[in-house]
Amino acid sequence: MTKNNNGANLGFENKLWEMADKMRGHMDAGEYKHVVLGLIFLKYISDAFQAKYDELFARQESDYTDPEDRDEYSAGNIFWVPREARWDKLQAEAKQPTIGKLIDDAMVAIEKENPTLKGVLPKDYSRPALDKHRLGELIDIIGNIGLGDEASRSKDILGRVYEYFLGRFAAAEGKGGGEFYTPQCVVKLLVRMIQPYKGRIFDPCCGSGGMFVQSERFVEQHGGRLGDIAVYGQESNPTTWKLARMNLAIRGIDADLGRHHADSFHNDLHKDLKADFILANPPFNMSDWGGQRLKEDVRWKYGVPPVNNANYAWISHFIHHLAPTGIVGFVMANGSMATNTSSEGEIRKKIIESDLVDCMIALPGQLFYTTPIPVCLWFVTRSKKADKRKGLRDRKGEMLFIDARKMGTLVDRVHRELTNDDLDLISDTYHEWRNTGGKYEDKPGWWKSATLDEIKSHGYVLTPGRYVGAEEVEDDGVPFEEKMAELSASLYQQFDKADQLEAVIRKNLEVLGYGK
């Protein structure tokens, strides 16, 4: 069985996806997404509830615990699931024509009993367009996820399946799907670069919440605890905001995503937040972001961004929300590194002269579902001063450029993925460059540490290819004269063959009556 770069067993998830996708019929992926993910979420919270219920039931005679005592569940941060909404009840009715209404009623009951889920869960399973026979089959498929495993293992599997399905729906939906999903390898790279061990983490265009999931996973993998980071997010799309709420709930991540969806530019829900870590993949080249109504905004410290492109509005928004020693890593369209359109070039110049940019990475193409074109990663920090506590050296007036365009592996005809080795190489290079005692060295064609003066000499263009140069080619020891003699002989042979081929073609044309 194959594995993806997070070690997940793709044989299991892929088989499950194929089974579920057969249930889709004529429903498009965007619509079907909410059907499937809503059921996985329902199965998850029901399993978590049932595990606690069984524990309390086993203890009730010895310490008089009541398995129906709601306080026992809230103390363990477990959603209360009413009797009529529990998975075993629904699966028992899966073959009934009324199953759609039963699921809708279950979702309503869960939202009523758990105010934090109000308005989040899908509640249109009873609609006539949804085939109830196939819905019942889908419930049976999802009902078998994690079957036979201990409760904690079952929950982990459900969370993994949810994340895997998000990616598959993004691929199935194409451009529209990528709006709520950033490829996992890109999220992992951002997290490994900024290393959010402890503090406030923020994503003002959080999509389905993948940045937060990977950040919490990073903390736990490095000896931290769930909750070491305080999570803040915002999302403008109402259905994507709901996906994020469900995704984070499945992972047990307590996040402040606001009480509703909202536009970060025109309704900043975290106006006073100064974050230690910011991770983001904003929509590229937004032309209708309403910039004409924000000309005097306090966030435009380095210049007013153009009204027909939001790229530099996003960059300014990130910097505005950055704590004094904070760092931000974000995805941006390649054009942002060199554009001089409208005010963009001047804003970039001021950001560079303020010594905020720490690292630029050029990524290979075909990583994203939204676009086949390559994108880049920006890393911006307010402080490049030495910090002995964090093991950081003084980097004032320096910037690292990494050209990763030749990295990655094709996973299908149109999509590429950065491998774990790629992620390690890129992030290790960055940390060796910025850390005290790091063994960093420039590598032509791949990475280069440049000074502000060098960047100024390139007109404040931040494209890594301008700085890293050409990759060194190993000398094969063959003298130049010998190489030229060999190449020339080969070239003259090709000339002779071309003459012979031309003669044959001319003769054939004459036979056909087209000779000169």
Image (spheres, rainbow, N blue to C red):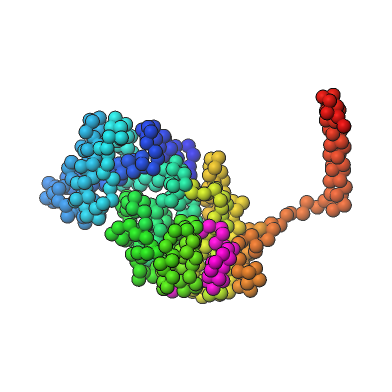
Tell me if residue 307 can be seen.
yes
Tell me if residue 299 can be seen.
no
Q: Quadrant of residue 474?
A: bottom right
Q: Is residue 229 above or below residue 146?
A: below
User: Which residue shows up at 39% across the image and 38% down it?
Assistant: 28
Which residue is situated farthest in the top direction here? 511
Q: Quadrant of residue 223?
A: bottom left
User: Which residue shows up at 68% across the image and 61% down it?
Assistant: 469
Residue 102 placement, left or right of 29:
left
Residues in magenta, as a range: 323-351
155 and 29: which is toward the camera: 29
41 and 55: which is toward the camera: 41
Q: Is residue 444 above or below residue 482?
A: below
Residue 295 placement, left or right of 409:
left
Q: Position of residue 423 (x, y in %)?
A: 53, 54
Q: Quadrant of residue 115?
A: bottom left
Q: Position of residue 457 (x, y in %)?
A: 66, 71
Where does the C terminus fall, quadrant-wise? top right
How many marks overall? Answer: 0
State yes or no: residue 326 in magenta. Answer: yes
User: Which residue shows up at 34% across the image and 50% down it?
Assistant: 239
Q: Position of residue 386 (x, y in %)?
A: 51, 75
State yes or no: residue 131 in magenta. Answer: no
User: Which residue shows up at 86% across the image and 46% down it?
Assistant: 488
Q: Position of residue 404 (x, y in %)?
A: 59, 55
